[in-house]
Amino acid sequence: MTEIAAERPTRLRRALDAVERAGNKLPDPVTLFVISIGLLMIVSALLAAAGTGALNPADGKPIAAISLLHADQLRRLFTELPQIFTGFPPLGIVLIMMIGVGVAERAGLFAAALSGLVRAVPKPLLTFTIVIAGCQASIASDAGYVVLIPLAGAIFAASGRHPVAGISAAFAGVAGGFTANLSITTLDGLLSGLTQAAAQLIDKTYTVEITSNWFLMMALMPVLSIAGTLVCERIVEPRLNAGPKWIDVAPLDHDPAKAARERRGLRWAGLTLLAYLGFVAFLAWEPGSALRDPADGDFDPLLRGLIAVLFLGFLLMGIAYGVAAGTIKSDRDAVQMASKGMAEMSSYLVLAFFAAVFVTLFAWSNLGALMAISGAEFLKSIGAGGLPILIMVILIAMATDLLVGSASAKWAILAPVLVPMLMLVGIAPEATQAAYRLGDSTTNMITPFMTYFPLILIMAQRYRPDFGIGSMIALMLPYTVAFFVASTALFAAWYLLDIPLGPGIERSYAPGPGPL
């Protein structure tokens, strides 16, 4: 028994090393899109030559595959390429948000808020607070990975608890709870734009709001936080304590002057937030005001203007914090912080360009509509209900996330097929998007191909030098299982009770008579 137990970790590490080598041979997501575009053009030409087509179930009109290698389509691509890129739905949303978020992050607001939150909580609530702070950290771009996770390890060590357990709890919240948040984030805008483009393959007038999954994502935060806390304290930490002793490292440095500046900055940011919320409430207070519809008095202008509201809020809070904490000494500092935030989006801009071309060509070819119709007919023939189909979407997202880490890159490929197909069996695009988001974040913490996985491994090796890839996956696997069970159960209850996914968002879709 001892020999078998000793062999298992070795075999596991050997298998994971093989997976890592294979995964490292995968092309960059941009290259994947380039390959996909080439294959799409060839396949469209072959299907068009074969006369592939179907009847639109909405109006009974025929739909035929269109060759992207035809002179008309090539001419259209060359002449409309700039508009294809600039008209990509997520592009403007993400860039606008990053101006405000970039200032707030680089001024130090997010790091100070996360550190202050974790340091201030009572010890019995430490694990829960770290997990929930990790979930909420997705609003702060990469701050959760580079600030909260090492901080959690150091605080656990200072409390006499295993530091790797603290790292695991924070990693679970930041990566596994990436999609859950009390606020709207840039991911909401990015995914909703892709979902809308995919939905318009079926209904050209369909719009997907940035708040389309907001209610579900807010409810997911406490559910994942409780699940993560139980896993950490009942499974992960006892297992770690039964293993090799962790190494003491230098305690957290405490600079009283810096801490005082951070507290002053947080007070200013908090006061700024209160004043700003009052201003927004004033603009939406009465029918006919700037953020209320003058005709029926609803809050549609506020919801559609949420990107602008969030952008300005982050910008003002970041400036207030930076001025009070001394990280912003002039207008040039604030402008440079915003510029650096935009500069770091350069890789996203390259990815977004090729994603925009792929999504547009997919729509031009009619292949998305044809695949959706054939897939919908298959689902109808086997009598699959809405919830089982959506759970299948969760599992598909989990599987693809093990190899491709980028949430937007995967959804840009999956959405044009899944969203129209499920619309034709009565499932709203917002529900399909929500199912994808649950699956996408669940396996983030166990895939070595996730961008920050090596960084988290190094953080754990500070306390356990023998900690390898297999050790990390074994550490995080219980969180993945628990998060999958908890999030799927919540989603199932949400679906069966027909609770809105967001403001005014239903889970079902009734195909209309409009043309594809």
Image (cartoon, rainbow, N blue to C red):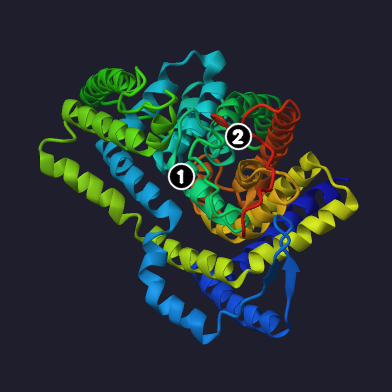
Disc 1 secondary structure class: helix
Disc 2 secondary structure class: loop
Q: Amino acid at mark 1?
A: Gly
Give the answer, above or below, for where 185 lies relative to 72.
above
Image quarter (top left, top right, bottom left or bottom right) of the C terminus: bottom right
Q: Which residue is mark 1?
A: 189
Q: Residue at x 55, y 84 (%)?
A: 69
Give the answer, above or below, for where 348 lies relative to 255.
below
The image quarter containing residue 62 is: bottom right
Q: Amino acid at mark 2?
A: Lys
Residue 27 percent coordinates (x, y): 55, 71
Residue 104 percent coordinates (x, y): 29, 36
Instruction: Left or right? Give the position of 81 relative to 495.
Output: left
How far separated are the C-alphas under marks 1 and 2?
45 Å
Label pair 1/2, CB-CB below 8 angstroms: no
Q: Which residue is mark 2?
A: 245
Mark 2 nearby-residue class (10 Å; few <14, some 14–19, many ≥20):
few
The image quarter containing residue 497 is: top right
Instruction: Left or right? Give the position of 291 relative to 162.
Output: left
Q: Outermost residue toward the left?
A: 330
The answer to whether residue 458 is seen in the rendering is yes
Q: Residue at x 85, y 50 (%)?
A: 4
Residue 171 percent coordinates (x, y): 54, 38
Q: Residue at x 69, y 39 (%)?
A: 508
Q: Earlier in the sequence, mark 1 or mark 2?
A: 1
Mark 1 nearby-residue class (10 Å; few <14, some 14–19, many ≥20):
many
- Front position among marks 1 and 2: 1
Residue 143, numbered label: none
Instruction: Left or right? Give the position of 286 relative to 229.
Output: left
The answer to whether residue 160 is seen in the rendering is no
Give the answer, above or below, for where 290 lies relative to 415.
above
Q: Residue at x 44, y 61 (%)?
A: 352
